[in-house]
Image (cartoon, helix red, strand yellow):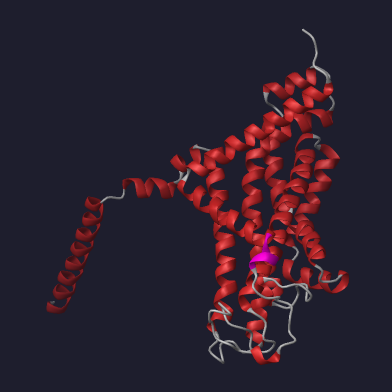
């Protein structure tokens, strides 16, 4: 059989991967929760990409002091800030960029670093496994928030520095989980066959073992992105974010510092809060759906699923009847004690 040229093989490989990704997202879209999550994420991505065209005002403009503390109106949909007069709706639009960039970039980077180190620890073993796992053990017991405060004060508060800090502190749990999965995969028949065929360690880890962990990596990336968004908002709220960029957490910090609650400017707090909720909710929905797709037994073996599956009106009636019986028994016992 004639071997295809390298260019055609690469092209066929890329087309195959694109079709696989398209089929995967089609399965996620067919799920009710996945459809909600993908729709919200698509809207957030659209808003982040076209923020300069969607935002009616420049959110960094603080020159016009006559616009301070305006309530929501047709001109300013979410009002203006009390201390600087910035348009809150425009700030909300631009804040989407920061949250998505920090969350998604950190989630993908954590998946890459955690998977590589986890596969190395599980497959190579020996001194490599001991070294990586001891680093994981040490980092897991270090309090994260004080360390983040120290690192941001030392290296700066630029958002790319914050992403690096999140990745440096966030890969440990995933690497340990990947290592446990690799210990099972390394004894599978196709890995043993590749070893007998003379394949190198790196070839086996990249071509045979790493794809076996893809379901865990995809799900972990979605859930990690949601967690990083909350963490970024928390850091910005504490004043540890980039002071030159607008984020949802920084909006909440400015609202607290500007006395939004004192002056009744609820929209200043409500807007970024809804943004954080929608972003985290959508990524969590996608992550849960991905886990159900990759691991179909998860839903059937879940104890919560079993409870809700068997929970019907008759069962609830029986529960309330038994509660009434217990109450009657308690009352009768009390009367007997009092009479005696």
Q: Is residue 255 above or below residue 322?
A: below
Quarter occupied by residue 16: top right
Question: Residue lying farthest top?
Answer: 1
Where does the image place residue 191, in percent across and percent down from the top left?
Answer: 73, 24
Q: Is residue 172 above or below residue 65?
A: above
Q: Nearer the viewer, residue 145 or 278?
A: 278
Quarter occupied by residue 67: bottom right
Residue 51 shown in magenta: yes
Q: Is residue 23 above or below residue 241?
A: above
Pick the quarter of the image with the C terminus.
Answer: bottom left
Question: Residue lying farthest right?
Answer: 154
Q: How many marks?
A: 0
Where does the image place residue 236, in percent across and percent down from the top left?
Answer: 71, 74
Q: Nearer the viewer, residue 134 or 115?
A: 115
Q: Chief secondary structure of the magenta span?
A: helix
Where does the image place residue 151, in percent across and percent down from the top left?
Answer: 83, 69
Q: Is residue 208 above or below residue 328?
A: above
Pick the quarter of the image with the N terminus.
Answer: top right
Q: Is residue 130 left or right of residue 288?
A: right
Residue 12 shown in magenta: no
What residue is drawn where x is 78% and y is 42%? 116
Quarter occupied by residue 24: top right
Q: Which residues are magenta?
A: 50-54
What residue is drawn where x is 75% and y is 47%? 114
Q: Is residue 260 left or right of residue 32?
A: right
What residue is drawn where x is 75% and y is 86%? 63
Where does the image place residue 278, in percent across and percent down from the top left?
Answer: 55, 63
């Amino acid at each position: 059989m004639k071997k295809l040229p390298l260019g055609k093989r690469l092209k066929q490989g890329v087309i195959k991967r694109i079709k696989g990704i398209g089929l995967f997202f089609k399965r996620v879209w067919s799920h009710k929760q996945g459809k909600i999550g993908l729709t919200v994420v698509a809207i957030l991505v659209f808003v982040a990409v076209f923020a300069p065209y969607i935002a009616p005002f420049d959110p960094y403009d603080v020159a016009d002091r006559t616009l301070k503390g305006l309530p929501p109106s047709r001109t300013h949909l979410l009002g203006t800030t009390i201390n600087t007069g910035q348009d809150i709706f425009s700030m909300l639009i631009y804040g989407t960029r920061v949250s998505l960039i920090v969350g998604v970039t950190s989630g993908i980077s954590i998946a890459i670093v955690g998977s590589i180190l986890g596969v190395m620890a599980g497959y190579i073993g020996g001194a490599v496994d001991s070294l990586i796992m001891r680093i994981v053990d040490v980092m897991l017991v270090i309090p994260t928030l004080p360390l983040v405060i120290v690192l941001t004060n030392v290296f700066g508060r630029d958002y790319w520095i914050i992403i690096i800090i999140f990745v440096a502190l966030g890969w440990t749990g995933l690497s340990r989980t990947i290592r446990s999965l690799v210990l099972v995969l390394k004894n599978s028949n196709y890995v043993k066959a590749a070893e007998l065929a003379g394949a190198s360690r790196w070839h086996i880890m990249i071509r045979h073992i790493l794809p076996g962990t893809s379901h865990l990596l995809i799900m972990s990336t979605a859930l990690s992105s949601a967690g990083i968004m909350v963490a970024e908002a928390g850091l910005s709220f504490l004043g540890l974010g980039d002071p030159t960029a607008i984020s949802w957490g920084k909006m909440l910090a400015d609202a607290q510092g500007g006395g939004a609650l004192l002056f009744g400017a609820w929209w200043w707090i409500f807007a970024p809060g809804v943004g954080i909720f929608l972003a985290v909710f959508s990524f969590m929905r996608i992550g849960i759906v991905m886990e159900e797709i990759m691991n179909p037994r998860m839903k059937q073996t879940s104890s919560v699923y079993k409870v809700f599956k068997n929970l019907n009106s008759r069962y609830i009636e029986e529960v309330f009847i038994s509660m009434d019986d217990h109450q009657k028994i308690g009352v009768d016992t009390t009367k007997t004690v009092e009479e005696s």
